[in-house]
Image (cartoon, helix red, strand yellow):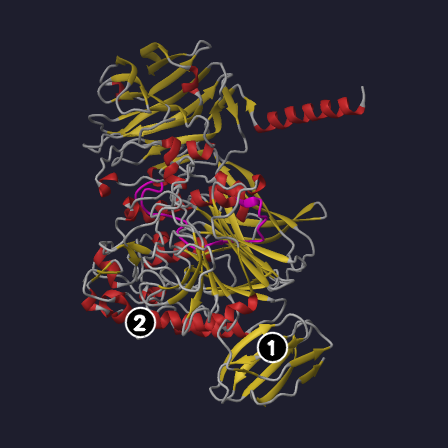
Amino acid sequence: MNLRVQARALLWMLTLILSFSACQKQDQFVAEFSDTNRTWIGPEFWANRLQDWKLENGKLVCLNENNRMRTLHVLTQNLADRAGAFEISVDIQLTEAMEGNASAGILFGAGAGQDYRQAALIHHSYGKHGGLYAGVSAEGKLFIRDFETEDTILGEIKVDSQVFDQPLKLTVQLNENSVLSATVMSQGKVVSRLEEVSLPEERTVGSIALVSNPDTAAKKGRFAFDNWSISGDKVDVFSDRTAGPVIGTQHTLDDGILKMTAQLMPLGVEDTQEVELEIQEQGEWKSVQKSQIDMPGFTSGFRLENWEKEEEVPYRIKYLLKSNSSTKATYYKGLIRKEPLDKDELVVAAFTGNHNNVRPNPTRWGGVDTGKFPWDWGLWFPHTDLIDNLKQHQPDVLFFSGDQVYEGASPTWADRQNGTLDYLYKWYLWYWAFGDLTAEIPTITIPDDHDVYHGNIWGAGGRKAAPGPYGGTAQDGGGYRMPAEWVKMVERTQTSHMPDAFDPTPVEQGIGVYYTDFTYGGVSFAVLEDRKFKSAPKGLLPEAEVVNGWARNKNFDPKKSSDAPEAVLLGQRQLDFLDSWAADWQEHTQMKAVLSQTIFADVVTLPRSEINDANFPGLEIYEKDGYAPDDVPAADMDSNGWPKTGRDEAVKRIRKAFAVHIAGDQHLGSTIQYGVSEYLDAGFALCVPSIANFYPRRWFPGSAGKNRLEGSPIYTGDHEDGFGNMMTVHAVSNPYISGKFPAELHDRAAGYGIARFNKTNREITFENWPRWADPSKGDKPYDGWPVTFSQEQNYGRKATGHLPEILVSGITDPVIQVYNESSQEIVYTLRIKGTSFAPKVFNTGHQYSVKVSDYSGSTVTQVFQGLSTKDKEAIVVSF
């Protein structure tokens, strides 16, 4: 046998081994429900919804009685796409009187061909790939129903109406000829049997779940389950498909401090309350820290100082899981990468708007809401297409700018009465989708309005919203509608792994803060909180008649009358932080960027007749070269275009660091350059498109932008937003008819952003990518990108003069700071490229100091005072 044949044989054998290890047949699966009492059922299961199920004295109990069709999917078992037989059985016990259409049973063949995580969400609705439901009803019927439609019965037979007086066993069988049967037994005897239900073989492919279905009118009919077993040669086993006890981690590495948060599932009081961080050194696992679990929220934090590893370090989170008087060590694994200080380019991947499905209310624009759910196109989770394409960019840092969670219909409507578990149910989906990335890549995650169950939020310094906890009136009044402890829990789950806050003093209600800086791979990031300190406009602008951030008074002119100088945007605390951060270029900092929820402009237009954004989902989406005929710049006070005075103060501080700004929230991808007193006098901003877009905003100004590049769309160039903020628009990812399936996803311009920081030539490149675009196939970013510019363009303000040229010897790339002695203010700070620099200034009548610093080792600084634009002789600085 030659070497080529041997290699092929070896490859074939390896393929078989890998396939077998990922997917195995099994004689029988028996669910082991732990005898502990807790919400989380176990690593092999996914509950819809989290708050609707619990373990109670060794049995699985469904608590839900207000909504139909709650399911518990088994993740490790799946019906294969091949001929074969199976048997699924479970004991069912009624725990509360049932009426009407209440039923319980087994869902199987759900989500055929879908990612197992997507299939595991199927419940409470109908649509393609819904599967088959075999159950017993309060009406005294044993049935097999098509779950793709609302009322198609494949077979049914009468059962004694008193069948639920005693626990029963339901068994569903499929024989080799694809013929289904179902049997009900009680007290060891067959009560009823439904036989020979024929159906196409492809209908018995997919996920398996238990179903508890109360009567939606009477709200009665709750069930408990036990002794769930699955067997047969049509069943595949995937032992690695689990969720918990640790479902994900996030970490940052900053200034030699590693901070990590492990997210656990909702454990019970009898469960182990401690987790352990282990790292691998020389092939051996070593325990480095233990941490208690914080509740509510079920997070556990780690902090390791003096982290000076010169190579990547595998880690794992160890948790001792108790079940039926035994304890098993479980592990969640990840990797701490070597800090990329020697890479020429640092790549940041940025995201916003983690909608997991589109389930719009068609009545909003005249349609009919059938209540059906088209699972084949309507459920976009777990975003594997986007993630696979993103990985090709090899990002060094991940930034999630907000709305990791949507409180409404993503995938279920908000349940504020069970707020913690409702939030966690949605938050776990984010980890299930992005956890493989966050386990290895340093991540900045900040919550936005929907994360705290608001449509819009003006945090007003953390105060409690009034009147009432949930109404729109309360939202417009400013503050948080949900309880303070709940808000703190949300922020802990998303931000506790980040570097320590710049000033940790809490705001009102004891709500904490997380604004901070994070330096990694030569780039320093300032992380802001756009919403927490921001004033609500309604009380400040009574004449505008503000509703949800929009002026309803048609005679109110936002450009002339909306600016309220007393209104807070970032607040003085964060402005002071920006001043400090802009001046600090120690360690390895070569470039700077600001990360926040939304950009400081309102890059949105609306038809002239519209007075708010409620109809965004219903606006026409055009062909690629189409253009809205009558749009005007919008004035949404939820954007950071308002308040203008606060916006200008923020932009001025950011430009002192020659920093870019990266954000999301607006649902519309854009790259602009800010202007304060004139166009181009401040930095560039990247607003990234939504991961999945329910509100497809657009930028179609009626007048062409000035000073735009030849051949560029008329919506580019110099424009003013609806508040009069100057901005130069370079690129916008307007929604258009893409021809991609599903249109409901891709026509709304979904995607992600990439920011590339080239430390060698000090250039930054912004890109916004469609989620369908595959870079390996030559697909490109959205039209208009990439946009590349130099670091120094981020302080594009025109100079009125220059101070003497600084000539440096002994070191390269020193940090130069210019200080206005007359105004007592730092003008700007920059690590220059090379050894010479002619500082520009903006007032020829003032005197200035120039500080030249070497941060390559111990800090050495030389200061030159009393300089003016009249001085012409170069200053020689030796180190």
Residue 381, quarter of the rendered image: top left
Q: Position of residue 719 (x, y in %)?
A: 38, 63
Which stretch did the figure color magenta? 390-414
Task: Name above or below for residue 545 compared with residue 165.
Answer: below
Which one is in front in this view, the residue at disc 1 or the one at disc 2?
A: 1
Label 2 element class: loop
Dot placed on the residue nearer the N-terminal end, 1 or 2: 2
Q: Residues within 10 Å of mark 1 (few under 14, many from 20)?
A: many
Q: Residue at x 66, y 76 (%)?
A: 836
The amino acid type, in three-letter code, at marker 1 is Ile
Residues 532 and 36: in front is 532
- State left or right for residue 768 relative to residue 394: left
Instruction: Calculate the distance from the C-alpha at mark 1 to the C-alpha at mark 2.
Output: 34 Å
Circle 1: element type: strand
Q: Which mark is residue 816?
A: 1
Circle number at residue 567: 2
Q: Quadrant of the C terminus?
A: bottom right
